[in-house]
Amino acid sequence: MKSNQDTGMSLNWKEELLVNAEQEILKLTDSDRFKIYLETLTKFHQYSLRNINLIYFQNPRATQVAGFKQWQKLFNRSVKKGEKAIKITAPITNKLTTEDQKRLHITDDYLVIGYRYISVFDICQTIGEPVINTKNFVKDRLQSHDDVTNFYQAFKSYLNQETILNVFEKDMNTLVRGYFTPQTNEIVINCHERDSAFKLKTLYHEYAHSQLHGEKAKFKNRPRAYQEAQAEAIAYVAMKNLGIDTGDYSLGYVATWAKKKETIHSALHEIQKISHHVIEMTDHLTSELNLQSK
């Protein structure tokens, strides 16, 4: 049994870790720093926002993490001697009986009752056999203009067929690359844009608006600059996930977010949620187009 002193020490390092991570997040006041954070979010989009923040604070250059034994068993790699672990949280669950499910009015097999800290290591902290990643194949394939064009067309068709959105191109005779109309759920892309990468980035941007700032969306009344920065951040994440860099992103409103802790956490949570959904949808489409094969 642990002594009170041991328990106090345990709580101290955990609290210190969270406080320090929090302070690092509040420093996201310029576009360059925010882009590094978004790259961490891209690689770990399936993680909770808390764990994304913890990884960003402890190792913002991390690309793939796993536990000590996971690296050995699943990837045939070993953690190098002397490497410092990255601490993240993992849920503590209880298996539910049929009676528990009825009492709680849920169908889940497990209930999260708390969280514990676990140690993980980035791939750069390990040695062993190469790790094959299908995303590398996708990035290689999407260096071709034709493949980017095909993916853009497939994404456009998917949104038209599988969602309530109506996506089409239009002659706008303007510098505006696209826009989203909440009242009609229309996403319009300027047909005069010849670069398929810019068209795709614009489509991701406007899709983000449709998810966060639509007619029935919870956050539709955010300030215009706030909405634009959120949509641009999600487009940045989506394009980074595909390995396509248009080099044309405007993330300037972040300085305003960071003035209030609650505001930036809310903004980041919304970005992480939609980014995760977009990446999952993108992975499905790249698989359908056989972009993951090589």
Image (spheres, helix red, strand yellow):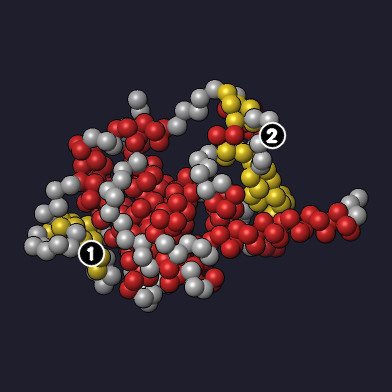
Numbered marks: total: 2
The residue under the point 69% across, 46% down is 118
- Give the residue type that dot 2 points to: Gly
Q: Residues within 10 Å of mark 2 (few under 14, many from 20)?
A: few
Q: Position of residue 222 (x, y in %)?
A: 38, 75
Question: Residue 74: where, in percent of width, then height?
Answer: 60, 29
Above or below: residue 13 compared with residue 292: below
- Which numbered disc, 1 or 2, marks the residue that appears first in the sequence? 2
Classify residue 189 as left or right of residue 37.
Answer: left
What residue sits 23% from the left and 64% below the top? Answer: 179
Residue located beneath label 1 in the image: 179
For the point 58% across and 63% down, which residue is it? 23
Specify whether residue 83 is in view: yes
Q: Secondary structure at mark 2?
A: loop
Picture coordinates of residue 128 (x, y %)? Answer: 57, 23
Examine the image and state in which quarter residue 68 appears.
top right
Residue farthest along the top direction in this orientation = 129
Q: Is residue 257 left or right of residue 110?
A: left
Badge 1 element: strand
Is the C terminus in the top left, top right, bottom left or bottom right quadrant? top left
Residue holding disc 2: 82
Q: Looking at the picture, tell me which residue is in the foreground, 158 or 247.
A: 247
Label 1: how many residues lie within 10 Å, few (<14), some (14-19) or many (20+)? Answer: some
Look at label 1 and name its amino acid.
Tyr
Q: Is residue 85 left or right of residue 281?
A: right
Above or below for 201 versus 65: below
What's the residue at 89%, 52% (across, down)? 2
